[in-house]
Every structure is written in C-alpha cells, then in structure tokens.
Amino acid sequence: MNGKTVMACIDAAYASLKEHTDEIALLDQQIGDGDHIFNLLRGMEALLAVRADIEAEDFGAALDLAASKVLSTVGGSSGPLFFSLLNGMAKASAGNAMDVAGFAHIYAAGVEAVGQRGKTGVGSKTMMDVLIPVAARFDELAVAGEPKAAVLEALPKVAEENMLATRDMLATKGRASFLGERSRGHIDPGARSSQLMITAVCARLAQNG
Ligand code: ADP
Ligand code: MG
C-alpha cells in the first residue's frame, strides 16, 4: 500500500460515484438538498488534479494529502466527515502494518474519527450505518485470520445490506432529520455513496497489491 494504491482506489471510487450521479442526486433531493453527490464529485476531482503528488507519497502521507484536499473542496456535512475518515486513517497508519489486521485497525480509526466529528453512531440514517457495520465485520474477519481475498469479498456485502437498511430508518441527524417521519422510505444518500465507494475500493484492491 502506497500513494499509487491510494490513487488507484480514488480512481475506482470516483468512477463508481460518477456512474451513479443521477441516483445519488435524487436520493439527496428526496431527504436533503440535492448537493451530496456534487459535493463528493468536486472533492474527488480535486484529488484527481493532484494525482502526481498523491502517487509520490507513502500510504499515510497520501491519505493525509487527500484529507486536506477533501476538507478544502467538499462542502456540506460530508466534507468534514470524509476529511475525518481519511485523516483518522492517515494518523492510524503510522502504528499499523499493511496487512488485514493492520488495515482493519486503520479503517476503524477513520470511522471512529467520523463518529467524533458527526457525533453519531448507527441508527441515525447516515453514512455511519454503512461505515460502522463494515468496520465491525472487518475486525471480526481480521481476528478470525481471514485472508485478504475473503475480506474484500465479504465487506461489500455488509455495506450493501446496511445501506439498504437505511431506507426504513427515521433520520435523526443531518438535514434529513428535519423531515421527521417523512425521511422514512428513502435510502440515505451518504449511506449509498459510502457503500459504492467501499465496494469500488474492495474490487480494486482485490485486483492486485
Ligand atoms: P448536507 O446535508 O449538509 O447537504 P451532504 O449532502 O454532502 O451535506 O451530505 C449528506 C449526508 O451526510 C447524509 O446523507 C448523511 O449520510 C451524512 N450525514 C449528515 N449528518 C451526519 C452526521 N452527523 N454524522 C454522519 N453522517 C452524517
Ligand atoms: Mg445535501
């Protein structure tokens, strides 16, 4: 894992978000203000614009650079939240090996940082409803000594199940919470974008390195 791997994951996540632009825009129109996907695409495009700088760094510094670009370009609630994810992972990368167990810790540290920033856990109908169950399963699989290929196959399924489960939840955080009961019946846009990014990154990492 190095800056080139980080950039390959960003490319994969960007391609998937781009492909689902209309769908995610609609989700955020239904329970938010419609800007979520455009916030994310703007951030990802800022990352693509500094490709050479990201690729030249080691894993932690690449994530750190990506985090600061995200913070300065992504608006809405999700900018500081995705900054926290990347920054939390960058910080944790120093003390962890780049194997399944180490990466489970690094990812969990990122999710923990998002939780602190957004002051929420599972059940509020946010991206946390995808990020946390994925971290929990990642930890279980790492503790069980599962190989990388099995982990990369399992996590997208956890992400998808939990993304779909946001449909029936009542939103209690963020803009969607203003709708009260009317927030039910729609998938949370941040849960969908997070699930798509996790799936794309796992598929990319399963290809090599
Ligand atoms: P805004 O709601 O400010 O327009 P975005 O549209 O970019 O920001 O992001 C909305 C997404 O942010 C939601 O779908 C939800 O997943 C996520 N979100 C909102 N508030 C929180 C929070 N406190 N913690 C975690 N995620 C949150
Ligand atoms: Mg929005």
Image: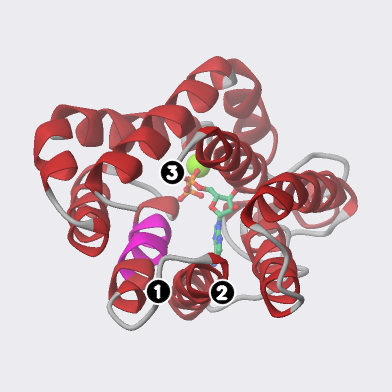
On screen, 90 above or below 174? below
Q: Amino acid at mark 3?
A: Gly
Q: Residue 101: give its label.
A: 2
The response on whether ligand 1 sits within 8 Å of label 2 is no
Of mark 3 and mark 1, the one earlier in the sequence is 1
Q: Amino acid at mark 2?
A: Ala
Q: Position of residue 99 (x, y in %)?
A: 49, 66
The residue mark sitting in front, 2 or 3, is: 3
Q: Report if residue 144 lies within the magenta region.
A: no
Q: Position of residue 187 (x, y in %)?
A: 77, 41
Q: Quadrant of the C terminus?
A: top left
The residue range painted magenta reads 80-87
The reply to whether residue 141 is visible in this rendering is yes
Q: Label 3: state its secondary structure.
A: loop
Q: Amino acid at mark 1?
A: Ala
On screen, 34 above or below 165? above
Q: Residue 97: give its label.
A: 1
Please report contact status of discs 2 and 1: CB closer than 8 Å, yes or no: yes
